[in-house]
Amino acid sequence: MEKSAQEILDQYGDMVFRTAYAMVKNPHDAEDIAQDVFVSLVRVQPKFESDEHQKAWLLRVTINRSKSFLRSAWQQRTQGLPDTLPDAAFTPGESTVLEAVAKLPEKYRQVVYLYYVEGYSSAELAKLLRLPQNTVLSRMARARKQLAKMLEGEFDYVEG
Amino acid sequence: MWKDDYVSGMQKLSPGEDWRAETLRRMESARKTRRIVPLKKAAAFTACAAALLLAVATIWPSIGLQNASGGTQSIAAAAAAPEEMQARMYSAQDAVAADENLAAAPLLCGTVVRWTQEELVLSVDGAEQTFRLDEQTVLEEGVLQEGALVQVSGEQQEDGTVYASRVEKAQE
C-alpha cells in the first residue's frame, strides 16, 4: 500500500536530514537538501520492492544531492555557510566527536555515518555507494586513523 | 568509545517542526501536480494517434477511388475524416503546448532524443512521470554531472505512461 507523505516523512525525515548533515555539515543546507529529496520522491514516484529498497533510494539520492551541492559553483565560490553543530543537547563527548568527524574529508564522513549510524555493513556500503568493498574498508580504516589522531589525548576513545 | 558518542550525538539531530510542516506542504503540492500530468500525456498520445489516423485518412480516399467496388459510403466517410482528425489533432497539440514542461513531448512517439544536462534536470525534476522508472538510474549513474549530454530512449505504454527505457551518455 502506498504510504502517505506524512508517513514517509515520519519514517525517513530524520534519516535523510542526518545523512545530508553528515555530508554538508550545516543544518540549514541539510534541511534544504532533505526537502528537495522528499519532493523528488513524490514527483518521480519510483516503484520500491521493500522498505529497505526505499531507504537505499533515499540515501543514494540524498548523497548525490549533497555531493552536487558541495561541488556547485556557488558553494565553491562562497565556501557556503560555516560548519555548525545543530541546536541539540549534546554531551561534551558527543560534541567533541561530532566536531572531529566533521573535519574528515567528505568520502570518509560518508562511510563513517552510514556504517555506524545507519548500520550498513561494508559489503552493503559497497553496493549502496557502488564502490569496491576494499575501497570502503580502506576508507573506514583511514577515517578511524584520522579520528584517532584528532581525538588523541581528549578522551579514552581511540580504538578500532 | 568514540563511536558510541558519535551515534548518540547523530541520533539527537532532527529537523525542526517548521521544516516538517513546509516539507509536507511541498510534498502534497507536488503530489497534486503529478495528477495533472497523465491527462496531459494522454492528450499528447492522442496527438500522435491522430496524426497517424490523419495520414491514413488522407491516403484512404485515393485508394477508395481506385477501388470502384468500395462504395460511396466508405469514400464519403473517409473524405470527411481528415477535417475531424485535424481538429482533434490541433486540439490535442494545443493541450500539450499549454503544458509548461515540453520536455516530455519528444518521448511520446517513442523516439530517441538528446537532451542537454539542463533539459534533463528539468525533465527529472519537472516532468514527474517521464522518468518514473529511471530517476534512480539517472541519479545513480551520475549523468546529471555538469556538462553531461544524455541520450534517452522513451517508450509509451498502453495506459499512456511514458517510460525512459534507456539513459546513457551521448557522444558530443
Image (spheres, coloured by chain):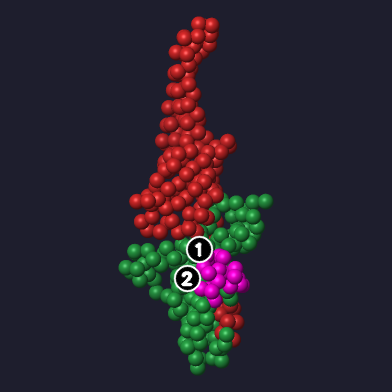
Chain colours: A green, B red
Q: Pick whichever, A46 or B8, lies toward us.
A: A46
Quadrant containing the C terminus of chain A is bottom right
Give the CA distance from mark 2 to mark 1. Answer: 9 Å
**Residue pushed farthest right?**
A1
Relative image position of residue A13 (x, y in whole percent): 57, 63
Q: Is B114 a magenta residue?
A: no
Is any part of residue B17 visible from this angle? no
* x 45%, y 59%: residue: B142
Whether the residues at callouts 2 and 1 have beta carbons within 8 Å, the answer is: yes
- Badge 2 crowding class, 10 Å Cα cut-off, few under 14, some 14 to 19, many 20 or more, is many
Relative image position of residue B146 (x, y in whole percent): 37, 58
* x 59%, y 70%: residue: A123
Give, as a three-letter code, the residue at label 1.
Thr
Label 2 or label 1, whichever comes before in sequence order? 2
- Badge 1 crowding class, 10 Å Cα cut-off, few under 14, some 14 to 19, many 20 or more, is many
Q: Is residue A153 left or right of residue B150?
A: right
Relative image position of residue B128 (x, y in whole percent): 50, 47
| Above-or-below relation of B59 to A37 | above
| Above-or-below relation of B110 to B80 | below
Q: Is residue B72 left or right of residue B118?
A: right
Q: Main secondary structure of the magenta part?
A: helix
Tell me the SS state at disc 2. helix
Q: Which residue is mark 1?
A: A62
Instruction: State the extent of the magenta-drawn residues as a range.
Output: A119-137
Q: Which mark is residue A23?
A: 2
Q: Total marks drawn?
A: 2
Is any part of residue B169 visible from this angle? yes
* x 51%, y 41%: residue: B155
* x 47%, y 70%: residue: A23
